[in-house]
Amino acid sequence: MSDKAERKKKLIRDTAREVFIRKGFKDVTMKDIAQTAGISRGGLYLYYSSTEELLLDVLRIESAESDDTFETAISRRAAAADILLLFLNEQKKELLNQQDALSVATYEYAFSTGPGESGFLRKRFQSAVRIIEHLIRAGIQNDEFYSSDPHAAATNIMFVIEGLKISAQTIGITEKEVDREIRYLMDGLARF
Amino acid sequence: MSDKAERKKKLIRDTAREVFIRKGFKDVTMKDIAQTAGISRGGLYLYYSSTEELLLDVLRIESAESDDTFETAISRRAAAADILLLFLNEQKKELLNQQDALSVATYEYAFSTGPGESGFLRKRFQSAVRIIEHLIRAGIQNDEFYSSDPHAAATNIMFVIEGLKISAQTIGITEKEVDREIRYLMDGLARF
Amino acid sequence: MSDKAERKKKLIRDTAREVFIRKGFKDVTMKDIAQTAGISRGGLYLYYSSTEELLLDVLRIESAESDDTFETAISRRAAAADILLLFLNEQKKELLNQQDALSVATYEYAFSTGPGESGFLRKRFQSAVRIIEHLIRAGIQNDEFYSSDPHAAATNIMFVIEGLKISAQTIGITEKEVDREIRYLMDGLARF
Amino acid sequence: MSDKAERKKKLIRDTAREVFIRKGFKDVTMKDIAQTAGISRGGLYLYYSSTEELLLDVLRIESAESDDTFETAISRRAAAADILLLFLNEQKKELLNQQDALSVATYEYAFSTGPGESGFLRKRFQSAVRIIEHLIRAGIQNDEFYSSDPHAAATNIMFVIEGLKISAQTIGITEKEVDREIRYLMDGLARF
DNA sequence: CATGAATGAGAGTTCATTCAT
DNA sequence: GATGAATGAACTCTCATTCAT
C-alpha cells in the first residue's frame, strides 16, 4: 500500500508543480491543488498539510533531478570553457522559458520565510559557486581562463545569473540580452 | 482643504510604506493599512482604492526622492570612480538594511503583474544603466577606467546589483560578501 | 432665499427623476443622486433625507403635470371615443418609451411599502377609472359606445393598462401588441 | 450521498422561497437565507452562489408544480367555461394570498434584468395565452362562448390577470374586485 | 447654507481546516 | 484511506449618515 501512496503523492506533487509554475506561491491554495489533481480537499490533507510543505517537496525533487544533467557533463571531462558555457546556457534556457519556471514560486516562498530561512536555497547557491570555481581553476590550468581570484569570479557569475533570473520575471528580458551577458562573463575570464 | 487632504494622503502613504516593508505586497490588506494608520476602512478608500494603487504611489514618491541624492553627486563633478563607488555603496546600504526595504513588495508586485508589465521597473533599470555607462565613459577619458564595451559593463553591473538584491532577500547576504562583490566590479573596470 | 432653495430643490428633483428612470428605486442611493446633481452628499440631506422622500416628491410633481394634458382634451368636448383613444395612446407612448418611465421605480417603491400603503397609487387608479367611466357614459349617450356596466368596463380597461405596463417592463412588449390590445378594448365598447 | 445533497438543496430552496415571499428579491441577501436556513454562509455557497440563482431555481420548481394542477383539469375534459373559471379562480387565489406570493420577487428580478431578458416569463405568459385560446376555441365549438378573435381574447385575459396581479401588490385589491373582473371577462366571452 | 471627510455597518465571497461517514 | 460537507474567519468594497469647518 505504501507503493500506491507513493504514486498518489507523486501525482499530487506533479500537479502542485504545474500550479506553482502557473500561479507562483502566494496565490496557490490547497483547494487549487486538490481541484487540479482531481482529488478531494480532505484527501489532499492526508499527504500534505500546507502549500509550503508541497512547494518544499516539489523543490527537493527538482534539485535532485537537475543536478544529474550537469554532473554527467563534468564527468565526461570536456573542456572547462565548454562546460561553463553549457551551464550558462542551461540557465539561459530556464530563465527564458517562463512556462517551466518555478522561480517565481521559489522567490515568493523565500520572501514569506525571510532571508536566510530557506537554507536549501543558500546551499544550492553555494554548491553552484563551488562547481563554477572548480571549473575556473581547471580552465586556468589548461590556459583557457585567467583569473586572479577564482572564488570571487565564480560568485560574481552566480550573482549575475540571479540578477538575470529576477530580471526575467520583473522587467522582462530578451534572449539577446542574456546572450550578451553570457559573452561578457566568458570574455571576463578569457581575457588574455 | 486640498492641503489637508494632501497631508492625510501622505500619512496614509507613509503608513503603507511601513506596512509594505514589513509584510511585502501580497500579504498586505487594506484593513492592515487602515488599522495601522488609525483610520477607518471606509476612510482609507477615500484616498486609495487598492493596495496596488498604494504601492505604486509609494514607489513613485520613493524614486523621485532617491534620484535626487544621486544627481547632486554627479553635478558636483566628483571623480567617476568615486561616484560609481558612491552609487554602489548606496545600493549596498539599501540591500543590507531590511528595515528599509521595499524590494520584496516591489518584487511581489512585479510577479503579480507579470514580466514587463511593470514598465516603471524597466525604466528604472535602464536609466541606472545609462548613468553607469556614462560614468564609465567619463572614467575612461580620465584614465581611471578601462573597458572595451562600456554599455555591456554597465549592464553587467546592474545585473550584479539585482542579483545581490534578490539574494539579500532570499538566501541572505553579509556585508562582507557585498563588499567583495563591489571590489570585484571595480577591479574589473580598473584593470589595464 | 426661499426662492433659491426652491430652485435647488427642483434641480435635485429633476436629477433624481432621471436617476430613478435609469435605475429604478431600490438601486438608487443618496450618493448616486448627489453625484449626478453635482452637489455634496451633506448638501443633499439639507433638502431630502431619503430616496423615498425624493421619489414621492418626484411622483407628486409628475402627476400634477400629467393630469393637465388630459383634462384639456376633455374640456375641448371632443367625441368620447376620440378622447378615450387619446388617453389609451398616451398610455401606449409611455409604456413603450422606457427612457421616460418612472414605472419601475414606482413599482419597486410600492413593493417596499406593501400593498395599499401607497395611497396615492390607488387614488390615481381610481381617478383614472372615474374619468374613463365618465367617457363611456358620454359615449353611450352619443351612441358611440355600448356597455351594460360602464363602471366594470372602465375598471377592466385600467387593469388591462396596468397589465400592459408591467408586461412592458418584465416580458417586454411590442408596439403591435399594444395596438392590438387597444383595438380589442375599443371594439369591446363599440360592439355593435 | 447525492441524495443527501439533494435534500439539503431542497431545504435551502424552501427556505429561500419563504424569504423571497417575505422580502421580495432585491432585499434578500445570501446571509438572510443562510441564517433562516440555519446554515453557515460558506455552506450556502456550496449549493447556490447568488440570490439570482436561487430565485431562478425556486421559480423553476414552482412552475413545474403549478403546471400539473392545471393540466389534470384539462385532461378530465370538463366544460371549457368551467376550466377557464377554474383557471381564473386559481389566479385569484394566488393574487389574493400574499403569504404565498412570489410575484413581488419575480417582478423585482425581472426589473433588475431588464425587459425581455427573463425569457422564462415571456414563455410562461405565452403558454398561458395558448392554453386560454385553446379553451376559448373549444368553448366556441360547444356553443359556450362566442369570440370573433380567440387569440386577441386570450391575450386580453392574460393582460387583465397581469394587471390584477400587479395591482394586488401595489394599490391592493379586494376579493370582490377580483370577482367582478372575472365575471366581466366571462361575460365578454359569453355574450351572444 | 454647503462641503466632503469620516465612521461603521453590512454584503459578497473565498478558503483553510476539521470531521462524520 | 478517501470524501466532501460544514464552519468560521478574513478580506474587499460600498453607503447612509453625521459633523466639524
Image: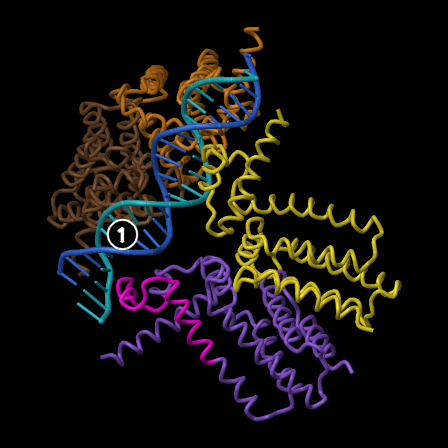
Chain colours: A purple, B yellow, C orange, D brown, E blue, F cyan
Toward the viewer: D74 or A38? A38
The residue drawn where x is 83% and y is 70% is B146
The span picked out in magenta is A36-65
Q: Is residue C13 above or below residue A143?
A: above
Dot 1: what SS? loop
- Residue B180 falls within the magenta-colored stretch: no
Q: Is residue C136 left or right of residue D178?
A: right
Report the number of discs: 1
Amino acid type of disc 1?
Answer: Tyr
Quadrant occupied by the C terminus of chain D: top left
Closer-to-camera residue (C125/A182): A182
Residue at image location 43% in from the left, 40% down from the top: C174
Which residue does the numbered mark 1 point to in the structure image? D47
A68 w.r.t. F13: above or below: below
Image coords of residue B162 (percent x, y): 63, 62
**Main structural element of the magenta stretch: helix, strand or loop?**
helix
Residue C180 x/y as whole percent: 39, 36
- Name the foreground residue: D168 vs D109: D109
Position above or below: D55 against D95? below
Name the spot of residue A70 as percent of width and height, x first.
Answer: 54, 84
Residue D55 placement (x, y as % from top left): 29, 44
- View extreme (top): residue: C1
Q: Residue at x 17, y 38 (%)?
A: D144
Residue A45 is one of the magenta-drawn residues: yes
Q: Chain of mark 1?
A: D
